[in-house]
Image (tube, rainbow, N blue to C red):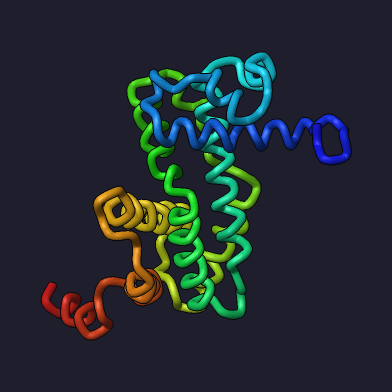
């Protein structure tokens, strides 16, 4: 019951279940994760979980989709088409900030990768959402402004997300330093200017 004595809305129950699932899967090996513990943390009955998610794998994937969708919304909110370089900086900082705030996110993604390895149900995890087109639209816009190289937008999207995920993975695990603000400038420069300086790129062409 909520503060007004009314039953929680279905959307609120879903949110609580997925948040609890993400935290449990983010700290417990998948096969040892308990649906009962997830239900207890969410404050619902175990039956309520199974009515929404047929099995533990579906629950794992749903928790992953929920977090990637939340992260995608942050990325979209950071975009200003008139300020593409600043937008890249905000996207980078937002990604690092989200992972600092939700340290279980990276472990949850590892659990999902492990669960989908050689698994015929891998297609059940689809981290796509309606905001994907908007992010690619920004990439095309930044390419038109000469900020990003003219690679296929879907490849750029994949490379950016992989770069940020890799940084969090290697810098954010326990015992390793957290992603620091000084990385922001390096990542933004890498994404906006590319690895090669114009002079080096030109020289490389002459030497071929």
Toward the viewer: 57 or 15? 15
Whether residue 140 is situated above or below residue 84 in the rendered picture: above
Residue 76 position within the rendered picture, expressed as x and y whole percent measured from the top left: 60, 61
- Residue at left 41%, top 58%? 160
Asked if residue 49 shows in the view, the reply is: yes
Residue 185 location (% of width, % of height): 37, 76
Q: Residue furthest left?
A: 207
Please indicate, yes or no, whether residue 189 appears anywhere in the rendered image.
no
Q: Is residue 94 left or right of residue 203?
A: right
Q: In this rendering, would 181 be left or right of 127?
A: left
Q: Residue at x 39, y 29 (%)?
A: 28
Q: Quadrant of the C terminus?
A: bottom left
| Res 54 quadrant in image | top right
Q: Quadrant of the N terminus?
A: top right
Q: Is residue 172 or residue 132 the one in the foreground? A: 172
Number of residue marks: 0
Which residue appears at 27% of the width and 52% of the height?
Answer: 170
- Expressed as whole percent of the image width and height from the top left, the position of residue 156 reads 42, 58
Question: Relative to the observer, which residue lies in front, 21 or 129?
Answer: 21
Q: What is the x, y in percent for residue 109?
A: 41, 39
Residue depicted at 42% across the width and 54% down the height: 161
Lateral position of residue 91 relative to residue 54, left or right: left
Rendered position, 184 above or below 1 = below
Does residue 60 appear to the left or right of 202 in the view shown? right
Task: Please tell me whether residue 140 is drawn above or below residue 41 in the rendered image.
Answer: below
């Amino acid at each position: 019951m909520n503060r007004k004595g009314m039953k929680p809305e279905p959307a609120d129950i879903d949110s609580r279940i997925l948040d609890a699932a993400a935290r449990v899967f983010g700290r417990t090996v998948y096969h040892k994760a308990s649906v009962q513990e997830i239900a207890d943390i969410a404050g619902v009955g175990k039956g309520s979980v199974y009515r929404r998610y047929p099995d533990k794998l579906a629950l794992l994937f749903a928790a992953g989709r929920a977090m990637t969708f939340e992260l995608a919304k942050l990325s979209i909110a950071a975009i200003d088409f008139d300020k593409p370089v600043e937008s890249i900086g905000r996207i980078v900082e937002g990604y690092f900030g989200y992972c600092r705030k939700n340290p279980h996110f990276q472990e949850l993604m590892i659990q999902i990768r492990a669960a989908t390895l050689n698994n015929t149900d891998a297609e059940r995890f689809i981290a796509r959402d309606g905001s994907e087109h908007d992010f690619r639209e920004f990439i095309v816009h930044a390419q038109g402004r000469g900020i990003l190289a003219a690679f296929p937008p879907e490849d750029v999207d994949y490379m950016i997300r992989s770069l940020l995920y890799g940084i969090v993975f290697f810098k954010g695990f326990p015992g390793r330093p957290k992603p620091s603000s000084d990385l922001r400038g390096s990542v933004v420069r890498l994404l906006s200017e590319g690895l090669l300086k114009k002079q080096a790129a030109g020289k490389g062409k002459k030497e071929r």
